[in-house]
Image (cartoon, coloured by chain):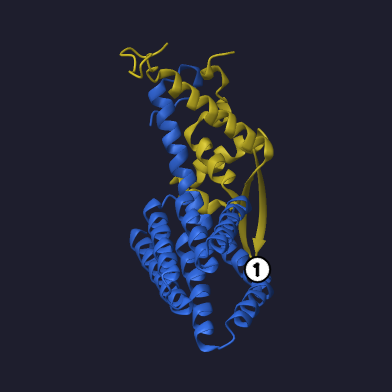
Chain colours: A yellow, B blue
């Protein structure tokens, strides 16, 4: 099996994109303004990362109008949810691989495991 | 957090930081979707109303059946209002999480019936506790469970069930309003 760092997905590894996909996965759908406030990012930054995620097929973007006001809704796709789950599993493996392994008798090893 | 564009050089400390970030975003999104403070006020109002109606009527069983029937009837209206409110706020919460909260509530109510406790209080308190826990409010979740346990102990001790429900309902509404006030202050 490959090292967990090899399984990290470069598309969602970037923190803002990871945050977007996490927030979208926890909601049925979320609008642009809420996402911007939740992640504390600028409009331009968020737009750029949304485009990257949409091109990868990880999110679906719907642009609607409420009266004359445009509104952008973001939802995670099944592929996006799967990619997020795989990314989180790989991150957990990296953290787990670095934690000291317990010795026989319950005491943790002094040196970190390779 | 150190922004990395090349994932293959990630250290365990970076990975742990990413996991903490994911957890924080997830909690904030769940809190915005589940709105546990509002849930406490709504569920508390249901318990309070049921308690008041039962205390006013001599036919308590009939009141309970009529109350549940009325809740089922108004549910689509409430669901539509909740959806509109969520769309106005800009975050439509996950159905999966709401179903999880409701399932735990139903299970707790069933267990209360078997154990001789108050099913309405048990179900509502368990649902509220799960919603609060998922929304990253473990203190509120623990307080809900403790309140439910005390209410059931008092119920088994022989207090008038209607009075018990009025007290618990009022307590849940007060806790929900306090949480809303705290959230407004944090903003």
Q: Position of residue B71 (x, y in %)?
A: 63, 74
Residue annotated with mark 1: B80
Q: Position of residue A10 (x, y in %)?
A: 56, 25
Q: Position of residue B129 (x, y in %)?
A: 46, 56
Q: Quarter of the image containing the C terminus of chain B?
A: bottom left
| A55 up-or-down from B87: above or below | above
Residue at 67% in and 41% down: A77
Q: Quarter of the image containing the N terminus of chain B?
A: top left
Residue lying furthest left: A110
Residue at 60% in and 77% down: B64
Front in this rendered view, residue B99 or B125: B125
Callout 1: 10 Å neighbours few (<14), some, many (20+)? Answer: few
Front in this rendered view, residue B3 or A25: A25
Label 1 sits on a secondary structure element that is: helix
Residue at 55% in and 38% down: A49
Front in this rendered view, residue A108 or A7: A108
**Side (left or right) of A83 relative to B5:** right
| B137 up-or-down from B60: above or below | above
In the rendered image, which quarter is residue B156 located in?
bottom left
Q: Position of residue B60 (x, y in %)?
A: 57, 82
In the rendered image, which quarter is residue A80 located in?
top right
Answer yes or no: is residue A30 visible: yes
């Amino acid at each position: 099996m490959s090292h967990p760092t090899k399984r990290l997905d470069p598309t969602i590894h970037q923190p803002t994109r990871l945050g977007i996909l996490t927030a979208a996965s926890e909601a049925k759908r979320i609008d642009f303004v809420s996402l911007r406030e939740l992640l504390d990012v600028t409009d331009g930054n968020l737009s750029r990362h949304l485009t990257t995620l949409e091109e990868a097929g990880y999110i679906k973007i719907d642009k609607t109008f409420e009266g004359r006001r445009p509104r952008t809704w973001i939802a995670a796709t099944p592929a996006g949810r799967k990619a997020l789950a795989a990314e989180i599993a790989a991150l957990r493996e990296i953290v787990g691989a670095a934690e000291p392994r317990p010795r026989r008798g319950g005491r943790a090893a002094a040196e970190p495991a390779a | 957090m150190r922004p990395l564009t090349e994932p293959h050089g990630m250290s365990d400390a970076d990975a742990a930081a990413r996991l903490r970030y994911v957890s924080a975003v997830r909690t904030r999104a769940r809190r915005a979707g589940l709105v546990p403070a509002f849930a406490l006020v709504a569920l508390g109002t249901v318990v309070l109303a049921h308690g008041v109606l039962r205390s006013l009527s001599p036919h308590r069983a009939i009141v309970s059946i009529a109350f549940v029937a009325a809740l089922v009837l108004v549910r689509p209206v409430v669901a539509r209002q909740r959806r509109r409110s969520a769309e106005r706020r800009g975050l439509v919460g996950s159905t999966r999480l709401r179903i999880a909260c409701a399932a735990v509530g139903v299970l707790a109510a069933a267990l209360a019936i078997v154990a001789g406790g108050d099913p309405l209080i048990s179900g509502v308190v368990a649902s509220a506790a799960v919603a609060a826990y998922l929304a990253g409010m473990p203190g509120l979740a623990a307080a809900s469970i403790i309140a439910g346990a005390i209410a059931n102990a008092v119920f088994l001790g022989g207090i008038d069930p209607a009075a018990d429900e009025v007290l618990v309902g009022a307590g849940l509404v007060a806790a929900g309003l306090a949480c809303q006030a705290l959230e407004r202050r944090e903003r």
